[in-house]
Amino acid sequence: MSAPRPIEAEYLSAAEAALTRAVGGGDGAASFELRLQVLEAASARFGGFDLAEFHEAFEVKSKRPAAELLELAAPVASAIERSLIHPALALSALAREALQEQDRKSTGAYHTDFRLATRLAQLAAPKLTHKSKVIDPASGAGILLAALTHAVCGMDRAKTAHWLAHGVYAADLSANSLRAALLALASFTDDVSALKAMRARWYCGDSLMADRKVWTAMAPEGFDAVIGNPPWEKVKLSRHEFLKSSGTKRHYGAQIHGLDEERFARQRDEVANYSRRLWVRYPDLGNGEPDLYIAFTDLFFELCKEQGVVAALIPGGLIRSQGTQAMRQKIFDASQSVSLSIIDNRARFFAIDTRFKFLAVALTKAGSEKSKREPITLLHERGTPTGLETTGTATIGRAALAAVRDDLSLPEVRSVAEWKLFSKIAEAGVSWEEPGCGWTPKFCREVDMTKERPKFLSRATPSALPLVEGRMVQAHRFGVKGHVSGTGRSALWEAYTIGGSRLSPQFWIRPSDMPRANQHRADVLRVGFCDIAGQTNERSLMASLIPAGVVCGNKVPTILFPDDPSEERLLVWVSIANSFAFDWMLRRVLTTTVNYFLLQSVPMPKLAKEGLPWKKLVSAARELRTLDSAGPTRETYERMAQLRGEIDAEVAVAYGLDLKDMELVLQDFPILDRGQVSLPGEAKSTITRDSVLAAMAKRTGSRSTVWSRRAVEARALGAMAYVPSELALGGENIEEEEGAQSHG
């Protein structure tokens, strides 16, 4: 997982360099104090206020004469003006306290990018005037309030002064953060008295536990707008995190040495006590470790007045996680309008994994139970160098959502057409728990690869069983990669050509070293899947039959169906799970891990066990299992591709899909067929799409021949459907025995 440098840091690099030169480098409180004073001087240059008067008003002991500070700030202000960021937002970013990793973990603080701040301000501003009351209850350095000030007041200095003096409120745990927020907002005005009146109303402390009298004193009827980027972490303390907070460098799975058990126990008790207080105050937190962002979302609603607006940055779990169901229900019940923008981190908003998804949420609080509830607006947005742009929009009726998603989790559909397709599949399918259907699963993570690592063997012994890792499982294929040498991230793995699968593990384990409750799983045939996935991967779900005589690591959860333990049931499940229709549904709710809750939220198609479609799926999956190790010949592969196309068509029809539906499904898999030869005049190969649609046309009795013609032409040129890109891009010849080597 990559953690990129935020693009904001690049834009402000010149200003940061000028600020470092002005301060003279160094660490510690004295250096940080001078840094803040230089930034206050830069703010004075933009706002026009008297710096000495400002320091006197806020009891700042100047480290340098005002004239000298203003001189030091000149190059900083000049660099800010040359950047692509509004001065107030730039000042906020530069005035932030530096957060170490352990600080981010303990506080859940991830600094807000200027583009996101601007976007939230745009969502809230249309409902506000310069006479409105707004608050950020987790303000940090105030970048959201600065963006909102600019959006509401523009260049009108008189409106800005009134807005600051009477309407802007902030709260934060850190006094330094509030000071940063003050200097950022000060850049809008020369009225020190307005700034003083504003700062006198702010609250320094834990907003989540603040007495409600604190808020009612600020706004007896509630705030016109609540804006925020609340902490995203859970309230917990593990031994690993405790050691890291103490400065100990270690990694998950490492042995714990030198742990101060007494101090750890005290901190653990403090965390547990705080959690209990949170549950009392915010009952919608649910069970388990409390998520701070859920508590803050609850607080946002509490602070917002009727017909007021809430605009916030929230992790994507709000719309999909099992633990956020109560909060989703509350949002939909208490909001007149709901707008949710899905955004990922590819544009480098935060120093976290680029695949991480979060939401820009805009809610209008309902005036009463009788207030009209508008449909949910679901947007997809992506970052640009200076802002965000919308890439997809869907409108979802609340009753329609409840009809297909009991938990009110929102599928990530990008258009009305996708929402209609999602609803169609959901309505045609059945729950895994539907009585009499036989799909009630028994999941198992057979061996924890971290916890049980000391018990692993590096070579085969008569008493040990091969250990299956996630990379060894693909769609309809088991044993697709074999270990060559090395361990961990430096391990070398060999990718086997299609038809050439075999078992070559990195580790073995004795059955007696497995958790006792799971030992019986190694004796039976079951199904398993690789739980590491992503919405934009070539394929999201990859499942196969798991034979007896092997043990699966935790990244290959296995499933048995106690109501129907037959081999046929397993074969049909593998067929469904590997189909494009099922994968498409899963991609609507997936992040980076296929957990049990998300997997089971995708309905199964209605299939009679003795019906012809069932028998076709059994026969095709059984033949695929045999062919997977029959030898890597082109003849073998062409047959496997044909069978997979027939399975995809059969499952799609079972879900009630037609040819046009399948065309829409396949649009969600744009990186299929990388490395395959394309048709003349076309930029990339579409052999898999064409083969699936040809099979679909045949299955539905369509007269269209365009897809079969395209597939035939592509095969004549040497293209092969369903080939994973790692094989095609590696220059593999399907007829050769040896596959390419790849690093795991």
Image: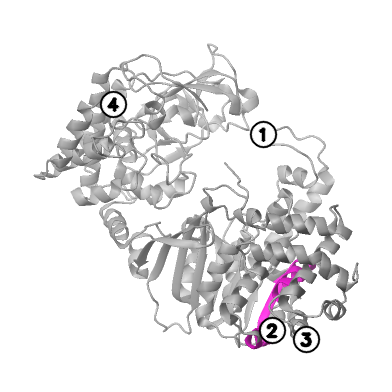
**Taking the image as drawn, is residue 98 in sight?**
no
Start and end of the magenta stretch?
Answer: 158-185
- Residue ID at (37%, 40%): 671
Write down the quadrant of residue 251 in the picture. top right
Q: Position of residue 276 (x, y in %)?
A: 68, 62
- Residue ID at (79%, 66%): 73
Q: Is 477 on the left or on the right of 18, as rendered?
A: left
Looking at this view, is 372 or 94 the one in front?
94
Q: Amino acid at mark 1?
A: Gly
Q: Which mark is residue 727?
A: none
Give the spatial CA distance, label 1 vs label 2: 49 Å
Which residue does the numbered mark 4 point to in the structure image? 624
Say which of marks 4 and 3 sits in front.
3
Q: Amino acid at mark 2?
A: Met
Say which of marks 2 and 3 sits in front.
3
Say which of marks 1 and 3 sits in front.
3
Tell me the SS state at disc 2: helix
Q: Of label 1 and label 3, which has the lower sequence position? A: 3
Q: Which mark is residue 253?
A: 1
- Near mark 1 (Cα within 10 A), the count class, few <14, some 14-19 or many ≥20, is few
Q: Position of residue 64 (x, y in %)?
A: 90, 68
Contact? badges 4 and 1 (CB < 8 Å): no
Q: Of label 4 and label 3, which has the lower sequence position? A: 3
Write down the quadrant of residue 545 in the picture. top left
Q: Position of residue 544 (x, y in %)?
A: 37, 31
Say which of marks 1 and 2 sits in front.
2
Residue farthest left in this picture? 703
Q: Is 661 on the left or on the right of 448, as rendered?
A: left
